[in-house]
Amino acid sequence: MSSKVMTMSEAISKNVKSGDLLFIGGAQHGSPSAAVHEIVRQKIDHLTIIALLANTGLLVSEGLVDTVLTGYYQLDEKRSYQLQRARALGKFPRFVEYSHFGIAQALQAGYMGVPFMPTRSQIGSDMLKYNENIISIDDPFGTGKIGLVKAVVPDVGILHVQRCDAEGNAQRWGTLGVDHEGINASKKIIITTEKIVDGDVIRRDPNRTIISGFRVNAVVEQPFGAYPVHLAGCYNDGPGAIGMMTSEEAYNAYMQAAVWGVKDWNEYLENLKKVNGPDFLDKIKIQNPAKSDPVITGI
Amino acid sequence: MSSKVMTMSEAISKNVKSGDLLFIGGAQHGSPSAAVHEIVRQKIDHLTIIALLANTGLLVSEGLVDTVLTGYYQLDEKRSYQLQRARALGKFPRFVEYSHFGIAQALQAGYMGVPFMPTRSQIGSDMLKYNENIISIDDPFGTGKIGLVKAVVPDVGILHVQRCDAEGNAQRWGTLGVDHEGINASKKIIITTEKIVDGDVIRRDPNRTIISGFRVNAVVEQPFGAYPVHLAGCYNDGPGAIGMMTSEEAYNAYMQAAVWGVKDWNEYLENLKKVNGPDFLDKIKIQNPAKSDPVITGI
Amino acid sequence: MPEKKYATDYTAFDQMVISAARMIKNTDTVYVGVGLPMQAGVLAKNYHASNCTIIIENGIVRASLFPIPRATDTLGSQSYAEQLSGLFYVNCLAQAGYITTGFMGGGQIDRHGNVNDTAVGDYRNPIHRWPGSGGGNDVMSFCGRTIVILEQSKRRFLEKVDFNTCPGYFDGKPGRREEAGLPPNTGPVAVITDLAIYSFEDREMTLRSVHAGCGVTLQKVKDELSWDVRIAKDLKDTEPPTEEEMRVYQEKIVAARPSFTIQPPGGRPPGPPAAR
Amino acid sequence: MPEKKYATDYTAFDQMVISAARMIKNTDTVYVGVGLPMQAGVLAKNYHASNCTIIIENGIVRASLFPIPRATDTLGSQSYAEQLSGLFYVNCLAQAGYITTGFMGGGQIDRHGNVNDTAVGDYRNPIHRWPGSGGGNDVMSFCGRTIVILEQSKRRFLEKVDFNTCPGYFDGKPGRREEAGLPPNTGPVAVITDLAIYSFEDREMTLRSVHAGCGVTLQKVKDELSWDVRIAKDLKDTEPPTEEEMRVYQEKIVAARPSFTIQPPGGRPPGPPAAR
């Protein structure tokens, strides 16, 4: 029954393959940082990634990415050590540019199982000249021009959540970015979770489930799995991310600390505490929690 | 600030007009029964209704409906006193037939602000021959045939919820039918609620909000507002609805009790208790409640 | 599972529900409509397929057991579900190909598995009207394997339905579903009646087994069909219910079967009308 | 509101933020991007428009006050919101016409209000690259009135942008937005810089007022534009900040303004780049 529960290493190696199209959740909120670092550790390459403000830059700088579908990406090479490094490796990715809503719509179409989503965004822009996944047609119902954004169906979706049961019934709250569309659009699904909870917790709040267990391939319990990104109800942003991308020296030091010099994310977290003090992670936990009133179901 | 809170009578008379296209929420669960009865009481006519298993039959039998957009409706006149009565009044409505998902998609397109939703449902059926709101086209991205369901944008949406604040921030749980799509697609919005709660209750569980206050025109506190339909966390189905539609006598008795002979829903409920015993409504309340674990937000 | 001992005291109706339940595998995700489909789903979940996931149209995804509901959406079928959402969400699961199995009833069915839930005769001037598609068209359009359960009679089993509400294989020629834009690898795979079980061979209803154990003959099956039905080379007697199946069926379905479905005025359960 | 007494000690930057905030009405629903748009939105909410609803791209709908966040999505901007959902939901609100006002920055802007957040020079071989649309295209495509806030310089204010990321009025001819399929009654209505305020007349940027109170001259404004700008007949000096505005601005924005935006590696705040 709980054969889905596994280590991060297993979850990634069993489900992510060279050449895959990846959805990585957590736009600006609760990115699956630990999972991304494990993909780097396993050097899974020729990826296409959907990068909507999630924590995916390391995949690019390590030369693992062929194509980035994005609405917003630091493309000024002078300011991006990540891009410089990808260039030096001969692995500068192709960027396919949408608006943010465009990415959300492409994933919505994937989640719905239809080939495109109609839109009024992007169709007034020059993006259409360079992105063949967005076109403008005459509305067959006669209302004039309408845009179509082609569906994206990720091979694998990775989402970090606050709670999930051993079967993969996953619950996430706070801002959802494109998490609902993206994870539901994905063929294979890896859930990383702050905590594996009893199924009864899920079943007493079923409206909060973002994806059901029958769709989920792997469940990984990983506290601070989004660090250094904030996660509602769990922790605030960590200080660790600042400045690491500005020089080769800082980059290499970070990579040694977070990937190459440790066997997994937990060892990285332990090392952070050794360096910064045992209360380092406690300090970013929620200080002024707000508790929701319970909702009632039952018969 | 709380000028949106009003009586059912005001909410309906201020927001529902003859000729309107109405979305009435609560497919099979938590229909806004009290609001529907008030529309009947005010005899607002020439309506188009989207009837997806919600409690809307009285509008038809009273001759108030010109058109029904539906996925499933008792169309055997021999078995439907409602239809017989509409026929006798010379007000037999036009029925426009979709599948259930078709209705959901039409409302989804309305909610999204696009002219249609692509679909693979209905396109294999004969429904397309008789419903011009569903067409089949060649996918411009070259994947073959794809259906398009035309958007529906209701003039007024009415939703019954478990809790809502005075500004109209409304929270609903249990099955949602087409409530999310339908209420978000609607231009004007009436929320009827079992209970008006403090805004703080809403803000400590913001992921549960189905529609925000800035979109809502009227808030009506109406306990047992969905009776005799069940509502998650509140009450089970009532026995009252059985058999009322089978004869003119039963129909007239019901209409006298629930509409013509009372000034509002609360008087109807009080009369139910007088007739059936003071614990009549208590008996359908949830007997074995399940409480959700609180979720934490905050900083 | 205990050794198979077959029951002796059962009806053709019991055989129909139990045969339908057997179509559900432990790994399936099953979209069930009201009535017989729901009974088959709940029976399977209580017997041999406890891990299957049940999808109910109004937004219910549940892996956990639940008592058979009076309608599809009740506090009982909602409560303690793994996920509650809406009709749009569960149909997107289906449209995107994540629902392996659909169970539905129907008004009429034809040789190529097309189902009519709309009108007998001309749509504009019908001899009889049913309530329409409900979720029937969605189930038949989307699910990997769709199983139709309905009581068999000559006037409901036709060479060609009067109105195609839920498309099977159209005229039976190859590729018709794909041409129409329906998802690949979908369509009806079985029809289960109170007389017999049919599969589809080359997109044509094909008699696989006759409910001989409750006295049904091949002739009776043929009498209740409007065309000269294709018969499988290895035509069999339907496997009767086992004693264990009958025990669970009696306990979980028959004893809990609603004697009368309470409905709100104007409200109706979803899905096509049960054949009656 | 207290009697108007104008401040004397303020910068052109202060004037820019405060003038932008004044564009927000108490009944508005405002889509704000990171940076100056967020500062203008939070100031308005703390001063004259306490009932306005603030929409933040990642799924935040809030009528309640909140401290100015370091980025758009923080625990502070999320917590105690009236509604949390996702990027798809808030953009549907916008696309369906329910967001009255959009606030955005930009890389370049042109005479007809088109904004470039993508590339300087040729897209395939650019002189400079910005991060791209983010939510900028969505805001400009959908919102009833869009207000662009950016610091003014000749190389950013062009006759025609190199790349049209966020469409204004295209070449300025009537009906171009509708022809392209953009929703009716949308488009840029104002550009607010550290030198001046512009509206759009006949779909062309038109100088309405100069920040004379902080020493800006009409010549300076013209020097930092690449075309011979249209000037309103009733050209005015920009209304300076009032003392009360400055007090609230100092307290709620300046004191709380993040000195350095902490970002996850690779992650970036949404919306177009702030002009700097």
Image: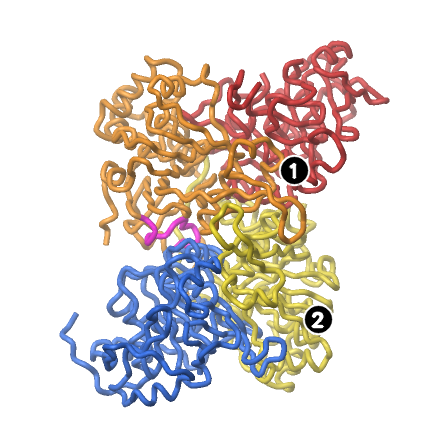
Chain colours: A yellow, B orange, C red, D blue
**Three-letter code, disc 2:** Leu
Left-right relation of A177 to D199: right
| Count of numbered badges drawn on the protein | 2
Q: Image quadrant of residue B232?
A: top left
Q: Chain of mark 2?
A: A
**Relative image position of residue D272 (x, y in whole percent):** 47, 72
Q: Chain of mark 1?
A: C
Q: Nearer the viewer, mark 2 or mark 1?
A: 1
- Mark 2 crowdedness (10 Å alpha carbons): few <14, some 14-19, many ≥20: many
- Say yes or no: labels 2 and 1 on the same chain: no
Q: What residue is shown with label 1?
A: C143
- The residue segment tinted magenta is B204-216
Quarter of the image that includes the N terminus of chain B? bottom left
**Residue type, numbered disc 1:** Cys
In the rendered image, is residue B209 in sight? yes
Q: Is residue A298 above or below residue D202?
A: above
Viewer can see residue B291: no
Q: Is residue B158 above or below residue A242?
A: above
Q: Position of residue A246 (x, y in %)?
A: 58, 84
Res B11 quadrant in image: top left
Which residue sits at x=63%, y=82%? A251
Q: Secondary structure at mark 1?
A: loop
Q: Position of residue D80 (x, y in %)?
A: 37, 60
Residue B210 sits inside the magenta stretch: yes
